[in-house]
Each structure stands twice: as structure tokens, then as C-alpha cells.
Amino acid sequence: MKEFQLIEHYFRNKGQKRRDVELSIGDDCALVNPAENKSIAISCDTLVENVHFLADIPAHALGYKSLAVNLSDLAAMGAEPAWFTLAITLPSVEPEWLERFSDGLFEIAEYYGIALIGGDTTRGPRCISITINGQVIKGSALTRGGACNGDWIYVTGTLGDSALGLDILRGAKIVNTEDKEYLINRHYYPTPRVLAGQALRNLATSAIDLSDGLVSDIQHVLKASKVGAIIDVSQIPLSASIKANLSREEALSYALTGGEDYELLFTVPESQRGAIDTALIHAGVKFVKIGQICAGDKLKLVDDGEPFVPVSRGFEHF
Ligand code: ADP
Ligand code: MG
């Protein structure tokens, strides 16, 4: 199969059509017509085999996850997904693999109403790179830079599941059969908090998506906002599946330092707390308060008032 046949068969005329796309796949560039009062939010994430995903990842999961991690960046800015391009590098053309990859990719693309408008197809070690474009009303994008002393810190969902799922896949952890599928799915099929991010516009003072782990990612907010933070680890949301299989210490270690949760961390002033409750309940997302922004530039972890040091998981994150 030639390159153009591959594009035609697996990527062109698939998924979402949008009226703001004037020219899609097939020419030298795509043409899109953004709304007049909106800024365009742009982000790019690359997944490299054996670095960002295991070689035996199901093709459907890889297609889904490649777009999910990019959508998560739009979510963190409060942007609405609009268009994306796909640069795909493969060692060979395997029709069944491509079919499943394309199914996974368009499953999530259609759910979020985002259109594939172009890309690049090359031969080489397996690698997927997506550039995503979203729109957000001018001046209302969430950034990492607005957290203020006294703001409350929240996270969506539960933390640590994806890192535990990865360890199960790598054979580094064994869990109950009834929790195994859930945890692996949390690793393969992250849920970008797109609606929650949009609901937080004009309410949250800062936001970030958790891709490297809470302790590491919150530092970006502290640095950009020039503030410190106190987090009470007893408030960190843990799934029933993680609690059923790990000690509290170990579960907290996954939740604080494990990567790839793709949940949102955001800060809210006291005056907006009620509004946040309403906004996020409408977005259908669970969220909890885990701490507070303070003066300084340090992150302090406490466990019901006592200083807390997460236990090492004893190996490097993949
Ligand atoms: P060029 O040589 O001008 O870069 P290509 O032959 O690489 O053009 O691509 C032809 C068309 O197909 C372009 O519109 C490009 O955006 C699109 N395209 C190429 N690869 C992909 C892909 N993997 N997914 C979606 N569109 C693609
Ligand atoms: Mg090209």
C-alpha cells in the first residue's frame, strides 16, 4: 500500500466534519476559519514506542491515547477542541493494525467533535505525533500563572491509577483480577477533562493537567504563579481499585508521583468555591479540595497536620 492510499483509507473522510474547515486532508495545507472573538490554543505531544508506550500496546488504545493526551492539554487551558494534525511514523504498513489505530483515534475524535485536517506519514521506528488546535474566547484561557495566596487547590478524578496500570502491564505489580482491567484501562484510555476545563474558565485562577505526577506538575503552577502550596495527602482522591490492592503509603506514592493520570489540578479563590461546585457538577466530573496556595515557593505535604514524605516506589517510572 502506497502512502497516499494509506491516508485515503484510514484517515481521510473519517470522523467529524466541521463547517469551519474550508479545506481538509489532500492539499498542501488545510484551511480553517476560526471564530472571530476567539484565540487559538495550540499544543503538540509525541508518543515514541518504548519511551511513551510499550511495544505491545493494542493499536486501538494507542490511537485513542495519542489524541486523549493532546486533548488534556486543551482541557487544562479551558479550550474547546477544534482541529488536529497527525504525524505517524511506522516501520511497515499493517492493515489490521492501522484499522484498529484509526478506530481508536476517531472514537475519541468524534466524541469531542474534533476534526483531523492533515498530517504526515513516514517510515521508521513507531512514533505518533499530534498537533492539536482548540478555541477559547479571547482573554478567558486558563494558565498556570494565576494562582494567589489563599486560593484552594483541587483535583479531578482519582490519582495513581494509570501508573499502577502501567506497572501491572510491565509485570512489576500483581493485583486482584477484578481491579486489573479497570487499572489497565485507566492507563490505556485516559479521560481528558475537556468539559471540566471549559467549566472552570473565569472561575479558576490557574490550571494544569497532571501528566508527570502531582508533585512534579504542581511545581509548574507554583513557579509560574510565584507562590507556594500545602497539600494534605489525606485528601488525595484514590480509587477503590488502588485502595483494594495497595497499602495506604504505597497508594499515596502512586497518586503523588505516578504519571499519566490526565486529571486537572486547579486553584480557586474562596469567593468562587460555590460557583465551582455548580459548574463542575454540570460537567459531570468528580473533584476534591486537596490543599491551599500559600506564600513562598515551596510545596509542603502534610498528613492530617503532620509532615509527610512519600515512600519511594523503588524503581524508575517508565
Ligand atoms: P506533502 O508532500 O505536501 O507534505 P503529503 O503527501 O505528505 O503532502 O500529504 C498529502 C495530504 O495528506 C496532505 O494534505 C497531508 O496533510 C495529508 N496527510 C498526510 N499524512 C496524513 C496522516 N497521517 N493523517 C492525516 N492526513 C495526512
Ligand atoms: Mg508530507
Image: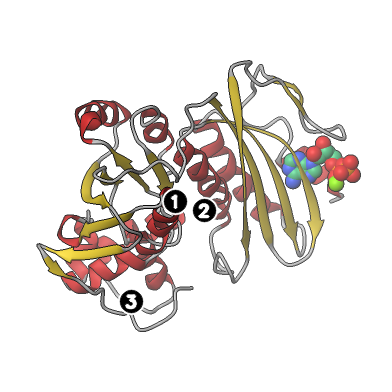
Instruction: State the CA–CA distance, disc 2 to disc 1.
Output: 6 Å
Q: Residue at the spot x=54%, y=69% of the render?
A: 54
Pick whichever, 231 or 177, lies toward us: 231
Residue position for label 2: 61
Q: Nearer the viewer, residue 54 or 75?
A: 75
Q: Kindly identify the amino acid type of the residue bearing the numbered disc 2.
A: Ala
For the residues bearing labels 2 and 1, Cβ distance under 8 angstroms: yes
Q: Where is residue 34 in the image (x, y as percent from the top left)?
A: 66, 21
Of helix, strand and loop, which one carries label 3? loop
Q: Can residue 185 be seen in this snapshot?
A: no
Kindly identify the amino acid type of the residue bearing the numbered disc 1.
Tyr
- Label 3, label 1: how many angstroms apart (C-alpha)? 19 Å
Q: Which of 60 and 292 is in front in this view?
A: 292
**Residue 312: percent from the left, percent from the top?**
31, 80
Q: How far apart are marks 2 and 3 (CA)?
A: 21 Å
Tell me, yes or no, if residue 253 can be seen here.
yes
Residue at the far front: name it: 296
Mark 1 — residue? 189
Q: In which quarter of the image is residue 159?
A: bottom left
What x and y, as percent, mark residue 28?
87, 35
Residue in front for this viewpoint, 75 or 291:
291
Quick check: 17 above or below 184? Answer: above
At x 36% / y 44%, what residue is drawn?
A: 147
Quarter holding residue 113: top right
Residue drawn at x 38%, y 27% as measured from the top left: 202
Image color mode: secondary structure
The amino acid type of the residue labelled 3 equals Lys
Which is more N-terminal, label 1 or label 2? Answer: 2
Q: Mark 3 points at which residue?
A: 173
Query: On the rendered structure, is 270 left or right of 7?
Result: left
